[in-house]
Image (cartoon, grey):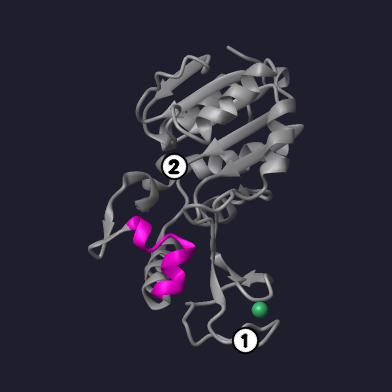
């Protein structure tokens, strides 16, 4: 049993497993098909050049699904703990806005967000209301068909890496939730945290073979996340 005061700097990484319980499937991790297209046919800059309509249709559909989904007990728990922790960093691989809608104030969405656009001409970003189409005009540079979802596609660099690394190197607790512990980014993050003597925890449906995790709790995120932060660490509900 830990006392919550023991950990002053916490970094949490969330992955597909936390949103899966809200009914959102991930194509990126599952290697699945969408509308008979392989995911790398719709999630690359090349795909956007070749077939922008198809790419917009894919992300419009995902955005609609995300809008309908509701945050679950795991999202709500992380939002509840944030203001109680002296230095809290939430990094998410998910592109939905369930953390934000649960009340999390600061989320480093390292793979981008479905509800934001990026202009490929002027590189300005903004919020999407409704859907994106190839007829859209950029509100900044006024070019047509330059707005793409602000999603980190295959072959592109994740966002906020400097910020994430700085916090990982300084944290005393690293918790990976709903993500595989043996592949990037969790596998890389735990290595950095461990090297800096942080306590490392994996909360996931499946266990992990990665020995860099000091502790592994298996189960549904909506159950094990509140159990860990409230019951084990002592944060207030
Ligand atoms: Zn523009």
Q: Is residue 204 visible?
A: yes
Question: Picture quarter containing residue 190?
Answer: top right
Mark number for residue 18? Answer: 2
On whether ligand 1 comes within 8 Å of the CB at mark 1, the answer is: yes
Q: Residues within 10 Å of mark 1 (few under 14, many from 20)?
A: some
Q: CA distance from mark 1 to mark 2?
A: 38 Å
Task: Name the side, left or right, on which 127 lies relative to 219.
Answer: right
- Report the number of discs: 2
Residue 26 in the image, given as x and y percentages of width and height:
37, 50
Q: Earlier in the sequence, mark 1 or mark 2?
A: 2
Q: Which residues are magenta?
A: 39-51
Question: Quarter of the image containing the C terminus?
Answer: top right
Our reading of the magenta stretch's main secondary structure is: helix
Up-down relation of residue 174 to residue 148 (above or below): above
Write the residue at 72% across / 42% down.
Answer: 163
Q: Nearer the viewer, residue 235 or 154?
A: 154
At x 53%, y 14%, the residue is 214
Q: Quadrant of ligand 1?
A: bottom right
The question of residue 177 being in magenta is answered with: no
Q: Nearer the viewer, residue 181 or 232?
A: 181
- 159 in relation to 41, above or below: above
How far from the left and from the top, in percent, is residue 130?
49, 77
- The residue identified by callout 1 is 143
Viewer-side label of 1, 2: 1
The residue lying at 65 percent from left, 71 percent from top is 126
Kind of element beneath mark 2: helix
Asked if residue 45 is among those painted magenta in the image, a careful observer would answer yes
The foreground one among 149 and 88 is 149
Q: Is residue 133 left or right of residue 86?
A: left
């Amino acid at each position: 049993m830990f006392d919550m005061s023991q950990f002053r700097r916490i970094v949490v990484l969330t992955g597909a497993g936390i949103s899966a319980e809200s009914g959102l499937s991930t194509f990126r991790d599952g290697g699945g098909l969408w509308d008979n297209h392989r995911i790398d046919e719709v999630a690359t800059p090349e795909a956007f050049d070749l077939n922008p309509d198809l790419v917009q249709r894919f992300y419009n559909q995902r955005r609609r699904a995300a809008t309908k989904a509701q945050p679950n007990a795991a999202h709500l728990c992380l939002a509840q703990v944030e203001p109680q922790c002296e230095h809290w960093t939430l990094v998410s691989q998910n592109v939905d806005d369930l953390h934000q809608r649960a009340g999390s104030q600061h989320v480093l969405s390292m793979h981008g967000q479905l509800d934001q656009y990026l202009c490929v001409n002027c590189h300005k970003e903004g919020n999407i209301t409704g859907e994106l189409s190839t007829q859209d005009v950029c509100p900044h540079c006024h070019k047509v068909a330059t707005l793409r979802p602000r999603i980190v596609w295959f072959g592109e660099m994740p966002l906020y890496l400097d910020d994430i690394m700085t916090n990982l190197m300084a944290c005393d607790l690293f918790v990976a939730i709903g993500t595989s512990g043996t592949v990037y980014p969790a596998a890389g993050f735990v290595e950095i945290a461990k090297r800096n003597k942080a306590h490392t925890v994996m909360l996931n449906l499946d266990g992990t073979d990665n020995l860099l995790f000091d502790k592994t709790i298996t189960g549904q995120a909506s159950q094990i996340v509140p159990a860990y932060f409230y019951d084990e660490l002592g944060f207030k509900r």
